Structure formats: C-alpha cells, structure tokens
Image: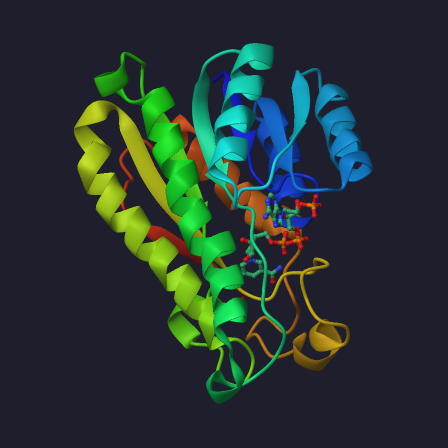
Amino acid sequence: MTVVLVTGGSRGIGAAAAVALAADGWDVGIGYRSRKDEAAKVAKAVEDQGRRAVAVQGDVTEPEDIERLFTEVTEALGPLKAVINNAGIVSPSGRVDEYDAERLDTVFRTNAISAFLVAGAAVRRMSTKYGADGGVIVNVSSRAAVLGSAGEYVDYAASKAAVDALTIGLANEVAKEGIRVLGVRPGLIETDIHEPGRLDRLGTTPPLGRPGKPEEVAELIAFLASSRSSYMTGTTIDVSGGR
Ligand code: NAP
C-alpha cells in the first residue's frame, strides 16, 4: 500500500480514517477546508505511526481547489492508490416546504457535485486508461440516503443518495481500469457535524443503543481501501448500529 488522499480529513470520520489508514501502512494526504490546526494534528497522528503525511487546504466545492489538492498530495507523497471521498456537510433542520434554492445549492454542491468532481480527479490519477496502476475510491454516504431524514434534512439525504448512485455507476465504468469504487453508509456518529443536542436526543435510537464512534466507521473505510476487499466493487456498506 502507498498513498491515500482523505478529503475532509481534519475532523470527525475523515480524521479517524486517516489514522486507521496510517495504521494499515498508508501515507496520507489530508484535505481540509479551513481548520488548519486540526489538520496538522491529524498529520502528526499519522506521522506518529511512522507514516508520511501532508495536510492541504482546499474547498471541494471549487474545481480548481480539487485539482490543486490532488497535485500537492501527489507531489508531496507520490502516486495515489486510494481516495476517500469524505468531505461533507448537513443542512439546518427543516421541512422540504421551507427550503430555498440557496440552501439546496449549498448542500448538493458540497455533498454531491464535489463527490463527482473528486471521484473524476481520482480516476484521472489512478486509472490504467491514464497510464496509472489502479486504486480504490471509497465514497462516504449516509444512512440518510435510505431513510430520507424527514423533518430534518431531506436534501442532505438526497445528496447522499446521489453519492450511492455514483458508487454503482462509476464502479461499472472503471472496473476494467484497475479501480474499485465502494461506499460506506454511516448512521449516527459522534462528530461535530450535528446540530447541538441532536446526538443527545437521538443517541439511543439505533438498535445497538448508542451512537457510533468515528473510529468504527474508519475501520470499515480502511478495510474497503485495502486489498482485503479485493472482490468488492460497486457496493455501499452500512455502519449504523442496526438502523
Ligand atoms: P465533520 O466532523 O463536520 O467534518 C467535516 C469535514 O469535512 C472536515 O474535515 C471539514 O473541513 C471538511 N469539509 C466540509 N466542507 C468542506 C468543503 N467545502 N471543502 C473541503 N472540506 C470540507 O463531519 P463528519 O461527521 O466527520 O462527516 C464526514 C462525512 O461523513 C460527511 O460526508 C458526512 O455527511 C458523513 N456522515 C456523517 C455522519 C455522522 O453522523 N457524523 C453520518 C453519516 C454520514 P474543516 O475541518 O476544515 O472544516
């Protein structure tokens, strides 16, 4: 294993994934939007495991930033063999009849359009069609894509359903180009993405009776990125405590 890029690697699930991947032997490029200090801490945690790390600022809603992110990580660490398509946001709680176009533009741009752009950039760097050796793309979806998130953020759920379709379609496009495309669908996970009080309110609702930890999603991401999942592509796995 060699080099992996994790978008949204400064916090939460992405930060835990960076550390889990380093434990598996990967050198890690850490993408982040604004929290430079947090990203630097994750880079240090990777280096503490004897692996190389670089943290690169970039907004995944900006196509030029995505290209620069890939270029800087590749220049610092070498050719990519995996990309974890993880950066994402939720919308404020609300019903569909309250949404405006600006809100919808923000959530679809950040979660769905950026996931396509990051995946496309990954294919251009890892596909045998482009002279590379292949690799793995892991898309971070959400159980919301299946449950719909009524009364909270149906737009977020729909943006993640787009990610699930990306996983299936792209996997079929690039299966013969050395690239496997997989997804994870986390449930309620203890990160800062939630509005205040949401974890307390919903934390015991999964059948396992508690929210998940970012590390529990990271383990699945590391497995999917590795050759241990070598006969898997085009599928998305739930990691959601049973709901
Ligand atoms: P988080 O703790 O809020 O972290 C979000 C990460 O994404 C941060 O590293 C942030 O960078 C980065 N980011 C956000 N917008 C960005 C942008 N426009 N450009 C570049 N980076 C951006 O979130 P999380 O809970 O770990 O979520 C990670 C992924 O898991 C998301 O796709 C989310 O939808 C999904 N997910 C989470 C849960 C959950 O319960 N937590 C459940 C299902 C799915 P900065 O630190 O610089 O802001």
Count of numbered tags: 0
Q: Quadrant of residue 163?
A: bottom left
Left/right of residue 50 with respect to residue 77 in the rendered view: right
Q: Examine the rendering and report whether any part of residue 242 can be seen.
A: no
Q: Nearer the viewer, residue 160 or 2?
A: 160
State the image coordinates of residue 48 (x, y, percent, origin top left): 77, 21
> Up-down: is 197 above or below 186?
below
**Side of 157 where 176 appears, left or right:** left
Q: At which x and y percent is residue 49?
A: 72, 21
Q: Quadrant of residue 197?
A: bottom right
In this picture the colour scheme is: rainbow
Q: Is residue 138 above or below residue 104?
A: above
Q: Residue at x 25, y 40 (%)?
A: 171
In this rendering, does residue 113 appear at all? yes
Image point 21% across, 32% down: which residue? Answer: 175
Q: In the rendering, at what x and y percent does residue 123 appear?
A: 33, 29
Compare residues 38 and 226 and report the one nearer the observer: 38
Q: Is residue 146 shown above or below 124?
A: below
**Is 72 left, or right, of 154 in this rendering?**
right
Q: Nearer the viewer, residue 19 or 195?
A: 195
Which sits in the foreground, 207 or 170? 170
Position of residue 187 relative to residue 51, above or below, is below
Q: Residue at x 36, y 25 (%)?
A: 135
The quadrant where residue 116 appears: top left
Residue lying at 47% horizontally and 18% vertically, measured from the top left: 1
Residue 138 placement (x, y as % from top left)? 42, 40
